[in-house]
Image (spheres, grey):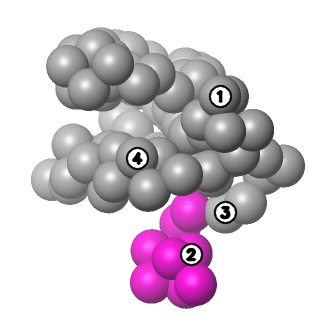
Amino acid sequence: AWLLDHAGWERDGDTIARTYKLKDFGAALAFAVRLGLVAEKRDHHPEIRVGWGSARVLWTTHDAAGITALDLDLAEATDALAAP
């Protein structure tokens, strides 16, 4: 149900994932660093794949073997970071 209200996110196995389109590699790397700082404060870390002009973010909770409310909360925080 959460995915229906959050455009761009998809289920990818035991994760929720979204690919963000960014200006160039530097913008993608800066986005990944900003997200890493948010994740570090929450002590919950995504997988981030950085490429030229894109960053793919995957959230999951390994201890729970799947997606938890914390993942959904941090996915929303990820969207907020990517907002213009």
Q: Which mark is residue 63?
A: 1
The answer to whether one can see residue 27 in this image is no
Cα separation between marks 3 and 4: 16 Å
Q: Where residue 57 appears, x then y in whole percent? A: 54, 36
CB atoms of marks 3 and 4 within 8 Å: no
Check disc 4 and report its element: helix, strand or loop.
Answer: helix
Q: SS of the residue at dot 2?
A: helix
Q: How crowded is mark 4: few (under 14 residues within 10 Å), some or many (20 or more)?
A: some
- Kindly give the residue lying farthest to the left in the view shown: 84
Q: Which of marks 1 and 4 is in front?
A: 1
Amino acid type of the residue tagged 4 in the rendering:
Leu
Q: Which residue is drawn at 67% across and 63% down?
A: 10
Q: Where 33 sits versus 54, above or below?
A: above
Marks 3/2: CA–CA distance: 7 Å
Mark 4, residue position: 70
First of labels 1, 4 by sequence position? 1
